[in-house]
Image (spheres, rainbow, N blue to C red):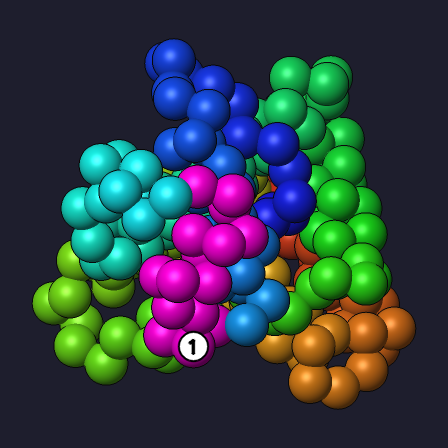
Amino acid sequence: MSVTTPLAPTRRVAPAKARILETAITRFYQDGIRSVGVDRLIEESSVTKATFYKHYGSKDRLISDYVDALALRAVDDFDASASEASTPEELLRAWTDHLVDYVHGDTFRGDPFLNAAAEFADPAHPVRERITEHFETMTERFAGVLEKLGHPMPGAAADRLILATLGLEAWSYTGDVIAASAAFRSAVDGLIAEAATAPR
């Protein structure tokens, strides 16, 4: 997923509130959630302190909306690829291309969900719970596609695809993006091949 993908509006949002969230999406991802203070968000959003607290009340609420926005964008990106694909294999390959392009971007800073999770040690924290929910949603979507593809174990294959995706993002950011991309494509090719050779 890309944290730069415009957020699809689901309801009317005040322009100032939208600016605050967009600023948070950029700054939290690029610099870290805890390292970005409210005063900086207010300044870069071009809003007053009163406006910030009117819409968000606290930084914690903004953090919650930030993680929600990341999850929505990831699902929207996947669903957009699905709407343009004519077959399950075409969807998987389009999604692979999307992720590889994403990790090659100049603003890529690793997986935003893992980055956020690393800042909240308590697994029962609402941020951690929302991240877990997001990965469950993506796993379900992957499993659905792999089932349509004819994979004999779509659930297990979806888990492997999640692992491959996170591996792509981690290795691309900390190591060799070219090697990571090649390994990711190979992993997806393997899942497709398993489906193609499965007994019917």
Report x, y in % for residue 4: 65, 44
Q: Please, is residue 161 above or below residue 46 in the view?
A: below
Q: Please report the residue visible at 16 percent of the width from the left and 77 percent of the height from the top.
A: 122
Q: Position of 100 compared to 114: left or right? A: right
Residue 33 falls within the magenta-colored stretch = yes
Whether residue 83 is visible to the viewer of this picture, yes or no, is: yes
Name the foreground residue: 7 vs 21.
21
Q: Please report the residue visible at 87 percent of the width from the left and 73 percent of the height from the top.
A: 178
Q: Residue furthest top?
A: 12
> Residue 104 lies in what quarter of the image?
bottom right
* Region in magenta: 32-47
Report x, y in % for residue 75: 49, 35
Q: Position of 155 compared to 132: left or right? A: right
Q: Please, is residue 100 above or below residue 83 in the view?
A: below
Which residue bears the numbered disc 1? 35
Quarter holding the C terminus is top right
Residue 6 falls within the magenta-colored stretch = no
Q: Residue furthest left?
A: 124
Q: Amino acid at mark 1?
A: Ser
Report x, y in % for residue 26: 57, 54
Q: Please report the residue visible at 39 percent of the width from the left and 22 percent of the height from the top.
A: 14
Whether residue 200 is visible to the viewer of this picture, yes or no, is: no
> Residue 170 lies in what quarter of the image?
bottom right
Q: Please report the residue visible at 65 percent of the width from the left and 53 percent of the height from the top.
A: 191
Name the foreground residue: 114 vs 54.
54
